[in-house]
Image: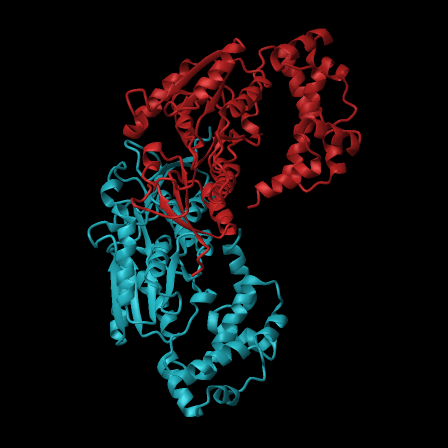
Chain colours: A red, B cyan
Amino acid sequence: MNAKRKNILLVLKEQRPTVFETILKHGHMMHWSIEYYPAEIPKNWYGDGAIVDYISPQEIARLPKGTPIATRSSIIADNIFPVRADTEYNMAMVFNFFRSRGYRNYAVANAHPMLYDPVTVIGRMAKEAGYNYDFIYWNLVGKKVMKEDFTRCIKVIGEWLLQLPKPCALYIGRIRSVHLVYRACEQVGVSIPKDVAIVSNTDDPEYGVNLLPSISVMSDNHEGAAIKMVEGLDGLINGKPAPRQIQLIRSDRIVARGSTDAYAVEHPATMQAIDYILSNYSNPQLTLQDITRAAGCTAVTLQRNFAKYLRRLPSSFLQEVRLEGAAAMLEKTTLNLQEIAQNVGYGSNMSLSLAFKSRFGMAPGQYRKNLNRVNRK
Amino acid sequence: MNAKRKNILLVLKEQRPTVFETILKHGHMMHWSIEYYPAEIPKNWYGDGAIVDYISPQEIARLPKGTPIATRSSIIADNIFPVRADTEYNMAMVFNFFRSRGYRNYAVANAHPMLYDPVTVIGRMAKEAGYNYDFIYWNLVGKKVMKEDFTRCIKVIGEWLLQLPKPCALYIGRIRSVHLVYRACEQVGVSIPKDVAIVSNTDDPEYGVNLLPSISVMSDNHEGAAIKMVEGLDGLINGKPAPRQIQLIRSDRIVARGSTDAYAVEHPATMQAIDYILSNYSNPQLTLQDITRAAGCTAVTLQRNFAKYLRRLPSSFLQEVRLEGAAAMLEKTTLNLQEIAQNVGYGSNMSLSLAFKSRFGMAPGQYRKNLNRVNRK
């Protein structure tokens, strides 16, 4: 038996294959002997360190005093490396995703209040922008509705959905709860994404793919959090001081999926211009005059309405559609840059490359490489 | 919303990425909308069908009467497709694995008694063969030792390990419990695999890889069970009658890992012959005379002792080592058949191919293809 091998406790409250496998893999590289327990910290455990994911401070106190610990709980202590999602950053991403699509009605659905709560954060952003806002905690209505009564839970969510002003942008706190909203929509006749457009997070990539109607998802970056916890724990074990602040993990991106990638613009001419751009952006000869003509209004009216609903000019909107298209092709196809440039209406791969870099902060090749690493399955 | 989409409940008691992802993937192909809940069936759920893995009959009774259900519980009913591991077959595989390596002392360690219990099955096989046998349920000793007291649990297992006759072949019911035995061995100075050679199952491939000293693992074929449940449930939903018997899932194989792939033969000359074969099997010119000479005894003595300890002749043992070597190379390398034949001491790829097929029931190419499918990550 190798004396240098560390005994590391791993306790995961939730079934998240990405977190589980990432920790096993990276822990393996650290030469850890990982002792896994689902859900609960075993009593009188002892060893070299622990990763305990979403475990309460009370329960963490069961570990021997001074044990190095990495955790997704908000605890600052000499032996703890704390990690959590950067809710402020992530929710700004969600809010801007909807805002740039013209939404003025916002809502958040979640099981119950949390310390860093999307309900609070998106609510504040919507109110600051002067938009409508509503929310629901379905496990509070009638106390623990979901666990107690699936049928009643769907009824409660359905009634809430019905009274929302439409079209509404809805963020659902956990992708595993999305089916409750699907069921509720079906029951009360609310349509996705026409009446309610949804973004949720990705607890698990495979789970998200499975949903229909497909919704846009914010990548929770659980892999990043898992790696951070392994590295943080390794640091503590090797005598590095514990950070004095919670380490924030940011989402990578929002993956816009067809059916939710809707626009909510009340001005018919602007909607026509949007449709025209979405259908013709691959044509490099496309001009503002073409777009104005398709909209059937003056250039000034069009500019004003784009600014009002989409918060940018028609030309920026066109560029964004082209770059998002290029990003999608880098992800989903094996086309080379030249071919992609042609497909999204860029005159040359050089100009695409430059614009892409300024939008996404990296060159197209780098973007594709990163994605291949993430989507390694 | 597509009216034809089925609402399928998925409840998994245990964190098993393979089961989770296989069901999501295959359910997706069936156009199911999967509603996942960890650990518990939600109250008043209703829908088109349910997969509930390792859930008690009492809890299953919560589902609406007549709901089609696939489950790994042993229930026979008109609406249930029951699946379970073929314990009898799997444990025979484990027993024969050790027996063919010369072990005469057997033991099983498990948390608590089960309906289809390795403790009973291996116990019966060992006793029938006239071998020593012992077992431990560590959650029974002092009532729920593991959950109540990690330290005491290791002490109890350590004392048990100490008194086992050595060398001992040990089967551990769950790979996630193997660390308890590692800790106990370390504490009482029992060596793996010299004193105690271990086989466990694979709850999760990544978890098994992580163990050190590495042990041999019996592939539990959770993927096969998951696919069976999806297909079984699909059948029930489409009106196929429920099977009148529990569907048995057999393990694919045992993956022998270096450090546990030990032999327990008390006869020194035979042990020398084994070592000689293991070191020289890649030489196609290797003869029985060479082996006998290395053993330092007569051919008759050698044959008698091979039969006694390994239950086969030296020539069959040599062939098995060569074929196991070829199988490992098919799995772990990209060498072609010609190169593999040379490496394992076969004169031609044709003769290797024939022998391989008669041993593993499939051609080498087929074997590699199957593994690539299983190890898709």
**Image spot of residue B194 (x, y percent):** 39, 69
Q: Quadrant of residue A150?
A: top left
Left or right placement of residue B258 versus residue A295 in this view: left
> Is residue B122 placed above or below A88 in the rendered structure?
below
Q: Quadrant of residue B193?
A: bottom left
Q: Is residue A85 visible in the rendered structure shown here?
A: yes
> Is residue B160 placed above or below A134 in the rendered structure?
below
What residue appears at the point 49 percent right and 11 percent down from the top-left corner?
Answer: A127
What residue appears at the point 27 percent right and 74 percent down from the top-left corner?
Answer: B131
What residue appears at the point 32 percent right and 50 percent down from the top-left corner?
Answer: B72
**Image spot of residue B53 (x, y percent):** 33, 46
**Image spot of residue A1 (x, y percent):** 42, 61
Q: Tally the marks.
A: 0
Left or right placement of residue A328 versus residue B293 in this view: right
- In front here: A279 or B241? A279
**Image spot of residue A58 (x, y percent):** 32, 33
Q: Is residue A190 visible in the rendered structure shown here?
A: no
